[in-house]
Amino acid sequence: MSFESILLFMMVFLFIVLVMLNVFNIIFFKRNQDKYNCLLAEYCQQGLDLDLITKVAFHFGHFVDLQKILWFVLLHKGVKMKYTQERCVRPEAYQFVQSLPEEKIGWILKLYRLYMLGFAIMIFLLLDILILLYFYK
């Protein structure tokens, strides 16, 4: 088996895995969408800061599922973020998300890790393509 064949096999295999992972992520989010909507409603009822992307992402379907959960992931991790150019996100928002029980936030963190796994697979796929193009012009 030649090096070129191995690269082609890896490229096809990684592409199939990436497609299957994205389909799984879509289904996983759809199954938990009611939990997400409840969490978002509870968060907004508290009057906490919510970024524009999370507000608008509701209208774009599964293409922006990562953007829908990213706000909560960053708050859970305690990442310092700006709400406006002059003001940071209030500490109450961090406290709210970090105090959530595992059944409310756990699935979001799991989905985030799956998206990061998909991103890593995409990087390996692109490296495979670049190696193939570089060595076999």
Image (spheres, helix red, strand yellow):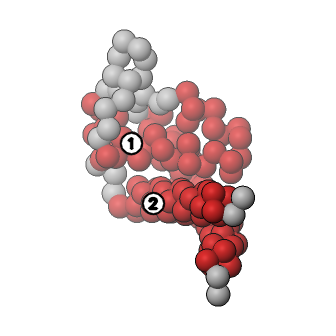
Report the amino acid beneath label 1. Leu
Report the amino acid beneath label 2. Arg
Distance from label 2 to label 1 (Cα)?
13 Å
In the rendering, at what x and y percent does residue 75 appear?
36, 41
Q: What secondary structure is marked by label 1?
A: helix
Task: Tell which of 20 and 25 is nearer to you.
Answer: 20
At 56% across and 44% down in the image, what residue appears? 68
- Label 1 Cα neighbours within 10 Å, binned few <14 / some 14-19 / many ≥20: some
Is 19 located above or below residue 66 in the figure?
below
| Residue occupying the far top of the picture | 86
Quarter of image, res 133: bottom right
Q: Which residue is mark 1?
A: 74
Q: What secondary structure is marked by label 2?
A: helix
The numbered disc on residue 113 is: 2
| Residue occupying the far bottom of the picture | 1
In the rendering, at what x and y percent does residue 30 appear?
64, 59
Q: Are marks 2 and 1 in contact (CB under 8 Å)?
A: no
The numbered disc on residue 94 is: none
Quarter of image, res 22: bottom right
